[in-house]
Image: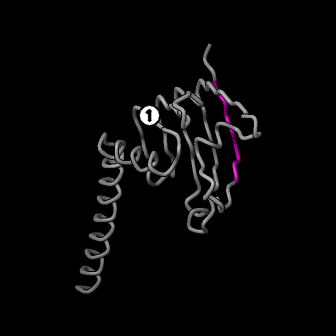
Amino acid sequence: MKYFKWVSIGIGSVIAVVLLAVLGAQFYLNTEQVRQRIQAKVNQAIPGTLTWSRNRFWVLGGKVELNHVLLRGPGNDKLIELERFSIHISWTGLLKGELTVHDLFLENPNVSLVKDRSGNLNLIQALYTLNHQNLGKMAVCHLILFSVS
Protein backbone atom coordinates (compact mmCIF):
# COMPACT_ATOMS: atom_id res chain seq x y z
CA MET A 1 0.00 0.00 0.00
CA LYS A 2 2.85 2.37 0.84
CA TYR A 3 4.53 1.52 -2.47
CA PHE A 4 1.37 2.43 -4.42
CA LYS A 5 1.14 5.75 -2.58
CA TRP A 6 4.73 6.72 -3.50
CA VAL A 7 4.31 5.63 -7.11
CA SER A 8 1.13 7.71 -7.37
CA ILE A 9 2.88 10.73 -5.88
CA GLY A 10 5.80 10.26 -8.29
CA ILE A 11 3.57 9.98 -11.36
CA GLY A 12 1.49 12.96 -10.24
CA SER A 13 4.65 15.00 -9.71
CA VAL A 14 5.96 14.16 -13.18
CA ILE A 15 2.63 15.10 -14.77
CA ALA A 16 2.56 18.39 -12.82
CA VAL A 17 6.13 19.27 -13.89
CA VAL A 18 5.33 18.50 -17.56
CA LEU A 19 2.18 20.64 -17.44
CA LEU A 20 4.07 23.51 -15.83
CA ALA A 21 6.81 23.23 -18.47
CA VAL A 22 4.24 23.32 -21.32
CA LEU A 23 2.43 26.29 -19.77
CA GLY A 24 5.76 28.07 -19.23
CA ALA A 25 6.78 27.44 -22.84
CA GLN A 26 3.36 28.64 -24.01
CA PHE A 27 3.73 31.89 -22.05
CA TYR A 28 7.37 32.45 -23.12
CA LEU A 29 6.71 31.85 -26.84
CA ASN A 30 4.12 34.65 -26.87
CA THR A 31 6.51 37.35 -25.56
CA GLU A 32 7.92 40.30 -27.48
CA GLN A 33 11.47 39.01 -26.96
CA VAL A 34 10.67 35.74 -28.76
CA ARG A 35 8.91 37.61 -31.59
CA GLN A 36 11.99 39.75 -32.18
CA ARG A 37 14.32 36.74 -32.02
CA ILE A 38 12.22 34.71 -34.48
CA GLN A 39 11.94 37.65 -36.88
CA ALA A 40 15.72 38.12 -36.80
CA LYS A 41 16.34 34.42 -37.52
CA VAL A 42 13.78 34.35 -40.36
CA ASN A 43 15.22 37.49 -41.92
CA GLN A 44 18.74 36.03 -41.79
CA ALA A 45 17.48 32.97 -43.68
CA ILE A 46 15.63 34.73 -46.52
CA PRO A 47 16.70 37.43 -49.00
CA GLY A 48 13.54 39.49 -48.29
CA THR A 49 12.23 40.90 -45.01
CA LEU A 50 9.34 39.45 -43.00
CA THR A 51 7.81 41.45 -40.14
CA TRP A 52 4.77 41.09 -37.91
CA SER A 53 3.50 42.98 -34.86
CA ARG A 54 2.33 40.15 -32.61
CA ASN A 55 2.56 36.38 -32.48
CA ARG A 56 0.57 33.75 -30.62
CA PHE A 57 1.66 30.13 -30.36
CA TRP A 58 -0.41 27.20 -29.13
CA VAL A 59 2.15 24.53 -28.25
CA LEU A 60 -0.21 21.59 -27.79
CA GLY A 61 -2.51 22.56 -30.65
CA GLY A 62 0.23 23.13 -33.20
CA LYS A 63 -1.15 26.53 -34.17
CA VAL A 64 0.63 29.81 -34.92
CA GLU A 65 -1.02 33.18 -35.45
CA LEU A 66 0.76 36.34 -36.65
CA ASN A 67 -0.82 39.81 -36.80
CA HIS A 68 0.00 42.62 -39.26
CA VAL A 69 2.29 40.52 -41.45
CA LEU A 70 4.41 42.20 -44.13
CA LEU A 71 6.78 40.49 -46.56
CA ARG A 72 9.10 42.75 -48.52
CA GLY A 73 11.31 41.66 -51.40
CA PRO A 74 15.08 42.13 -51.60
CA GLY A 75 14.42 45.52 -53.26
CA ASN A 76 12.19 46.57 -50.31
CA ASP A 77 9.00 46.31 -52.40
CA LYS A 78 5.81 45.13 -50.64
CA LEU A 79 4.94 41.60 -51.77
CA ILE A 80 2.45 40.32 -49.21
CA GLU A 81 0.54 42.23 -46.54
CA LEU A 82 -1.88 40.45 -44.21
CA GLU A 83 -4.01 41.59 -41.31
CA ARG A 84 -3.72 38.11 -39.78
CA PHE A 85 -1.94 34.89 -40.71
CA SER A 86 -2.88 31.67 -38.96
CA ILE A 87 -1.52 28.18 -39.58
CA HIS A 88 -2.36 24.87 -37.92
CA ILE A 89 0.26 22.17 -38.45
CA SER A 90 0.45 18.48 -37.68
CA TRP A 91 2.89 17.49 -34.93
CA THR A 92 2.97 13.91 -36.19
CA GLY A 93 3.92 15.13 -39.66
CA LEU A 94 6.80 17.16 -38.21
CA LEU A 95 8.09 14.08 -36.43
CA LYS A 96 8.18 12.34 -39.83
CA GLY A 97 10.06 15.26 -41.39
CA GLU A 98 7.01 16.54 -43.28
CA LEU A 99 5.15 19.81 -42.96
CA THR A 100 1.43 19.01 -43.05
CA VAL A 101 -0.80 22.08 -42.82
CA HIS A 102 -4.33 21.37 -41.58
CA ASP A 103 -5.60 24.94 -41.90
CA LEU A 104 -4.08 28.09 -43.38
CA PHE A 105 -6.00 31.34 -42.81
CA LEU A 106 -5.10 34.66 -44.47
CA GLU A 107 -7.13 37.71 -43.43
CA ASN A 108 -7.26 40.72 -45.77
CA PRO A 109 -4.47 39.54 -48.08
CA ASN A 110 -2.83 42.13 -50.30
CA VAL A 111 -0.45 40.38 -52.71
CA SER A 112 1.74 41.90 -55.41
CA LEU A 113 3.28 39.23 -57.67
CA VAL A 114 5.48 40.22 -60.59
CA LYS A 115 7.64 38.23 -63.01
CA ASP A 116 10.93 39.71 -64.14
CA ARG A 117 12.30 39.42 -67.69
CA SER A 118 13.88 36.07 -66.83
CA GLY A 119 10.52 34.68 -65.71
CA ASN A 120 11.43 34.69 -62.00
CA LEU A 121 8.59 35.50 -59.59
CA ASN A 122 9.37 38.24 -57.04
CA LEU A 123 7.82 36.17 -54.23
CA ILE A 124 10.24 33.31 -54.83
CA GLN A 125 13.18 35.73 -54.95
CA ALA A 126 12.13 37.12 -51.53
CA LEU A 127 11.93 33.70 -49.87
CA TYR A 128 14.59 31.51 -51.47
CA THR A 129 18.15 31.88 -52.63
CA LEU A 130 19.65 29.74 -55.36
CA ASN A 131 21.30 27.38 -52.85
CA HIS A 132 17.93 26.20 -51.43
CA GLN A 133 17.57 22.90 -53.25
CA ASN A 134 15.63 20.52 -51.02
CA LEU A 135 12.55 22.17 -49.57
CA GLY A 136 11.07 18.91 -48.25
CA LYS A 137 7.45 17.75 -48.38
CA MET A 138 4.47 19.95 -47.63
CA ALA A 139 0.73 19.35 -47.85
CA VAL A 140 -2.08 21.89 -47.29
CA CYS A 141 -5.48 20.48 -46.29
CA HIS A 142 -7.50 23.74 -46.08
CA LEU A 143 -6.71 27.23 -47.37
CA ILE A 144 -9.01 30.03 -46.25
CA LEU A 145 -8.77 33.55 -47.67
CA PHE A 146 -10.85 36.06 -45.75
CA SER A 147 -11.27 39.69 -46.75
CA VAL A 148 -13.29 42.24 -44.83
CA SER A 149 -14.70 45.01 -47.01
Label the magenta part by its dominant secondary structure: strand
Label 1 secondary element: loop
Q: Is 94 located above or below residue 78 in the figure?
A: below
Q: Is 61 located above or below residue 6 in the figure?
A: above
Q: Which residue is painted at 70% across and 53% down in the image?
A: 139
Name which residue type carries label 1. Trp
The quarter holding residue 108 reads: top right
Q: Is residue 87 magenta?
A: no
The quarter holding residue 119 reads: top right
Q: Which residue is painted at 64% across and 27% down in the image?
A: 111
- Looking at the picture, how far across and down is residue 50, in whole percent? 48, 38
Classify residue 85 as left or right of residue 144. Answer: left
Classify residue 121 as left or right of residue 7. Answer: right
- Looking at the picture, how far across and down is residue 57, in whole percent? 43, 46
The boundaries of the magenta stretch are 139-146
The quarter holding residue 118 reads: top right
Nearer-the-camera pick, 42 or 48: 48
In the displayed image of the protein, which residue is found farthest to the front? 117
- Looking at the picture, how far across and down is residue 78, in whole percent? 56, 27
Q: Which residue is mark 1?
A: 52
Q: In which quadrant is the C terminus drawn?
A: top right
- Looking at the picture, how far across and down is residue 22, in whole percent? 35, 57
Characterize the local packing of mark 1: few (<14), some (14-19) or many (20 or more) Cα atoms within 10 angstroms.
Answer: some
